[in-house]
Amino acid sequence: MEKIQIIDAKKHVGEVVKIGAWVANKRSSGKIAFLQLRDGTAYFQGVVVKNDVSEEIFHLAKELPQETSIWVTGEIREDSRSKFGYELGVQEIEVVGESHDYPITPKEHGTEFLMDHRHLWLRSSKQHAIMQVRNEVIRATYEFFNARHFTKVDPPILTGSAPEGTTDLFETNYFDQKAYLSQSGQLYMEAAAMAFGKVFSFGPTFRAEKSKTRRHLIEFWMMEPEMAFMHQEESLQIQEEYVAFLVQNLLDHCDYALHVLDRDRTVLEKYTKLPYPRISYDDAVAMLQENGFDDIEWGEDFGSPHETFIANSFDQPVFILNYPKDIKPFYMKPHPTREDIVICADLIAPEGYGEIIGGSERATDYNYLLEQIRNYGLDEEEYSWYLDLRKYGTVPHTGFGLGLERTVTWLAGIEHVREAIPFPRLLNRIYP
Ligand code: 4AD
Ligand code: MG
């Protein structure tokens, strides 16, 4: 008899199969018991009919506590009434691991309680669906960049520098030196782009930000492509193609997860249409001021109400271009005709999810960068390797960083970024 995974049920209709599963939930009436089974690939129903099984099996099925692990044998049948479309006509059950007093019951629990039990909460169908979305974004990312001849390069996590500003660094001891957990792999990716042309990284980054919002994590994953011989315009096209590709793959491969999450496919379909709208920082400020935001002046960074207003004025992701130099990192390329702005763009997700991509063209001039490093109070010695990139065959280059969890939060249509990563690190939480 074949051992299968629930997700493959449709290939085995009419066959008797064996599945290793947990009992997520159950209900029973006199002559029938319904087991909600999960094996990590999907959830479906096992139906135990009193007259079809031994008295012992029926009794066992009715008494199985939540989260007991079992080997279950039965026949796969179509079931048009369920979201999943198939069910198991149970014949045999063998208990593998007992479970008693499982803390997360089908009733409502508060978020703090669920976060304290994150190691178990991950088993629930909504969390499962979110992780399927995350997995698809990761898979599609590799497909997109590999197809375009990007090389995956892994920057270090223990670093000596602070590319995105020195205020939110995690400091640690590196023998008799200081080190920081990486805020961004960008500077190393610039070196990699000079070696391999087009590169991308995909790994954890750390920000000791004292922000307690639904968009901020302390540890999050970032996707950072860097491209040699490329100006900003071409990068913007790659960014929008990439995001539209993520949405399309989600629609193509994650129907069941989107169903569980109640995510409206017609809303997502709008995000596959290109190009995405663009607005300059200048115009965005003017637009906000005209619409009653008297708390924003030219030169200030946007807060989430500002981003949400701008996003709601379009029904697709929107690029905000060319921010003031003073609120952006040292490495961005200065504008050719204006001293006060730099060549950069943030991509703002629709529906109030905020910034999902930050990117820019990079300054290529040795002397300009040296001056910037001094102006930003950074250690010249520490950046001498970075300056070398401008000494030996410097070229126009551009890159960006997409935050994985913010993207997943948006695509899954969930409330808070903490559910978009298996074990979130938050301002007040490093457990479990
Ligand atoms: O805009 P950021 O800070 O850009 C960089 O780090 C550049 N070095 C990227 C590059 O050009 N290679 O961060 C990029 C993205 C943001 O748009 C956001 O999606 C995400 O990373 N991000 C966070 N996500 C969750 N929690 C946080 N605290 C985040 N900070 C940034
Ligand atoms: Mg940013």
Image: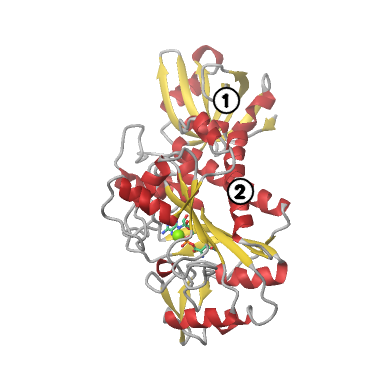
Instruction: Assign the N terminus to one quadrant of the image.
Output: top right
Would you place residue 235 above or below residue 49 in this image? Answer: below
Within 10 Å of disc 1 (Cα), the crowding (few <14, some 14-19, many 20+) is some
Depth check: 303 or 263 in front?
303
Residue 414 in picture, x, y percent from top left: 42, 40
Task: Kindly tell me whether residue 214 is visible in this rendering.
Answer: no
Identify the amino acid type marked 1.
Glu
Numbered marks: total? 2
Q: Mark 1 CB in 8 Å range of ligand 1?
A: no
Taking 179 as reference, is 275 left or right?
right
Label 1 or label 2, whichever comes before in sequence order: 1
Q: Which residue is mark 1?
A: 92
Residue 401 in picture, x, y percent from top left: 53, 59
Residue 248 in picture, x, y percent from top left: 60, 38
Q: Mark 2 CB in 8 Å range of ligand 1?
A: no
- Mark 1 or 2: the one toward you: 2
Would you place residue 370 above or below residue 252 in this image? Answer: below
Within 10 Å of disc 2 (Cα), the crowding (few <14, some 14-19, many 20+) is some
| Residue at the spot 43% in from the left edge and 81% down from the top edge | 375
| Residue at the spot 61% in from the left edge and 32% down from the top edge | 7
- Quarter, ligand 2: bottom left
Numbered mark located on residue 242 in the image: 2
Residue 58 in picture, x, y percent from top left: 48, 20
Would you place residue 64 above or below residue 159 in this image? Answer: above
Would you place residue 383 above or below residue 203 in this image? Answer: below
Identify the amino acid type marked 2.
Tyr
Q: CA distance from mark 1 to mark 2?
A: 47 Å
Depth check: 390 or 277 in front?
277
Taking 173 as reference, is 397 left or right?
right
Q: Secondary structure at mark 1?
A: strand
Depth check: 135 or 296 in front?
296
